[in-house]
Image: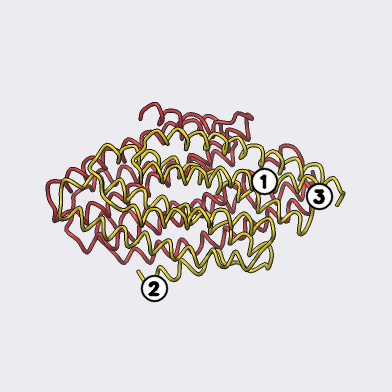
Chain colours: A yellow, B red
Amino acid sequence: MTRHFDLELKDLKSLLLKMGGYVEKSIEQASLLVIRREPWRFREVQASEIEINLLNKEVDHLCFCLLAKQAPVAKDLRFILAVVKINVDLERMGDQAVNIGYAGVDYVRRPMINITQEMSDMTERVRLMVRDSLDALVNRDVELSRLILERDEIVDQYKARLLDYLQDLMVHDRTLVESALDLIMIARNMERLADHATNIAEEVIFLATGEDVRHKGARLKEVNGG
Amino acid sequence: MTRHFDLELKDLKSLLLKMGGYVEKSIEQASLLVIRREPWRFREVQASEIEINLLNKEVDHLCFCLLAKQAPVAKDLRFILAVVKINVDLERMGDQAVNIGYAGVDYVRRPMINITQEMSDMTERVRLMVRDSLDALVNRDVELSRLILERDEIVDQYKARLLDYLQDLMVHDRTLVESALDLIMIARNMERLADHATNIAEEVIFLATGEDVRHKGARLKEVNGG
């Protein structure tokens, strides 16, 4: 491959990191909207989503150009195909944050339920998973990717505990049904954000080692546990 | 491009249609599980998911080989990149059907809520959206793709009505809280299945016309609609 190819590959990585930055920001803003009951933050979430969507198109276009002009093979081709998929995940993560925003805007009009600590912890974990998954991609860091897979299980546990708590609230206090339902949707969206970061980590492992962890672990565990 | 390339492209399309067939089947089985309260159908859903995951790898591999060996450009390159993304959607649809299965297995152990008609209608619409989205891809049918975008809005309305009804039930009858919550999750997963079919239709429109409908319509509408 040419030196020009390496430069464009570097551009591609920068774009992904930038996109990841906006995803982190939108997760943080959506979470603060819910925790501090500040609906104006929804505009921030939407502003990040616009940037994410623009970057999504830019990444797609750069991948297309790299493939068309350079016709890479082997390792480089695999990397670009992974980026095409990861780009989809990042765009959907922007959507998820917006979904949290919508549910949050509904929630702040309703009776409050105190889940500040759990929501802050969950948000911080998910945000770090996003950052680390892209760092893992750029540095082909398999160890970090495996760590993300483990952290996904912890986020699942957070969500499960929150769901139990909120479901119990609903049964015992009908005035909290709507608030609890909003928070359940928000917790589920947070979990799905973590799932997307996990998808990225799985792509990195496949890219670096050829090991396909995409359709095993989590799913089998779920079947046995479920 | 060579004649060999055309043959491989035909293979790729067959694999996608086969994958779509399993997705349709798994949606149908997951829905019957819920409607008829037949938990044994979960095995059918899982069996389809295994096939979907195998096909997912096969499609990825074929795309890689096509790009590496044939280095297509322009139209053919765009098609293969679209397939890489659509393959992600189809794999996630298999996951969604499994999620419906899990919630369904929980639901059948709980008090029944009669939503047979709504669930059947919604399932049938979503199943057709999946089939049509892949037919649209294979035949580059822009008109059919636009129809799918419209149908997605109808599925959203189904989901919204179901959610209102179930939320109301929860407020008025605490013994139905858990059943209603399961059905809300199921309705949301159905809606997400329709979203994936919509993603496919949007890719087809982009592929055939260059028009990017991915980040407009639905989202802006949602914002204005509150």
Q: Position of residue B164 (x, y in %)?
A: 23, 40
Instruction: Classify A54 as above or below A137.
Output: above
Instruction: Classify A148 as above or below B86.
Output: below
Q: Position of residue A80 (x, y in %)?
A: 70, 51
Give the number of the mark in front: 1 or 3: 3
Dot label at residue B27: none
- The image quarter containing residue B45 is bottom left
Give the number of the mark in front: 2 or 1: 2
Foreground residue among B105 and B62? B105
Residue linked to disc 3: A6
Name the residue: 79% across, 43% down. Answer: B1
Query: Are labels 2 and 1 on one chain?
Result: no
* Neighbour tally class for label 3: few under 14, some 14-19, many 20 plus, Cα within 10 Å: few
Left or right: A52 with respect to B123? right
- Tag 1: amino acid: Ile
Name the residue: 36% across, 34% down. Answer: B154
Foreground residue among B20 and B100? B100
Residue linked to disc 2: A224
- Tag 3: amino acid: Asp
Identify the secondary structure beneath mark 2. Answer: helix
Chain ID of residue with mark 2: A
Instruction: Report, in whole angstroms, how far the alpha carbon at label 1 lies from the one at label 3.
Output: 23 Å
